[in-house]
Amino acid sequence: MNSITLKGQTITLSEQLIKSQSLSTEDVATILGLHARKLALYEELETAEDFSLEALGRELREVEYALQRAWKFPQSAKYHRFWEAPRCACPKMDNAERYPSDLAIVNGNCPLHGEIGYE
């Protein structure tokens, strides 16, 4: 089975999508590794010192782009659900309603995205 569990969270990849994207076993392993990193970053965000949050937010964004590349999708921030990250102070309901959209709403006081925005 193409899934990974970390700290009680399970990510299961769609077999249909794996086939439709013609992904190799190595591609699937890469995607699972990236999901493991994303879940680990979520855990790090829970306890990180405030000064490191912006850097962790940037790394999380890079993992999202790497996942898009690994799935052979076009890279676009409008498909990142950035507001779901722990300690993100960006409006959750507003962004969820707009998803996917180029019109994301970023809280200027968000410790992850406030200074740098989200693109």
Image (cartoon, rainbow, N blue to C red):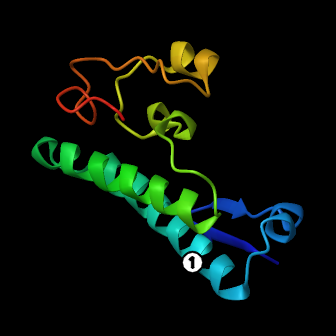
Q: Can you tell which quarter of the image residue 22 is in? A: bottom right
Would you place residue 30 above or below residue 58 in this image? below
Q: Position of residue 55 (x, y in %)?
A: 20, 51
Left or right: where does residue 96 sit relative to residue 18? left
- The residue most toward the right is 16
Q: Quarter of the image for the C terminus: give it.
A: top left
13 or 50: which is nearer to us? 13
- The residue most toward the front is 74
Number of marks:
1
Three-letter code for the amino acid on which mark 1 is drawn? Thr
Q: Position of residue 18 (x, y in %)?
A: 80, 69
Q: Position of residue 83 (x, y in %)?
A: 46, 31
Left or right: where does residue 100 sit relative to residue 107? right
90 or 16: which is nearer to us? 16
- The residue most toward the left is 51
Q: Position of residue 41 (x, y in %)?
A: 38, 58
Left or right: where does residue 24 sit relative to residue 61? right
Q: Quarter of the image for the N terminus: give it.
A: bottom right
Residue at 21% across, 33% down: 116
Residue at 15% across, 49% down: 52
Residue at 43% across, 40% down: 85
Residue tagged 1? 30
Residue at 50% across, 21% down: 92
Label 1 sits on a secondary structure element that is helix
Would you place residue 101 above or below residue 10 in this image? above
Crowd band around label 1 with a 10 angstrom C-alpha radius: few (<14), some (14–19), many (20+): some
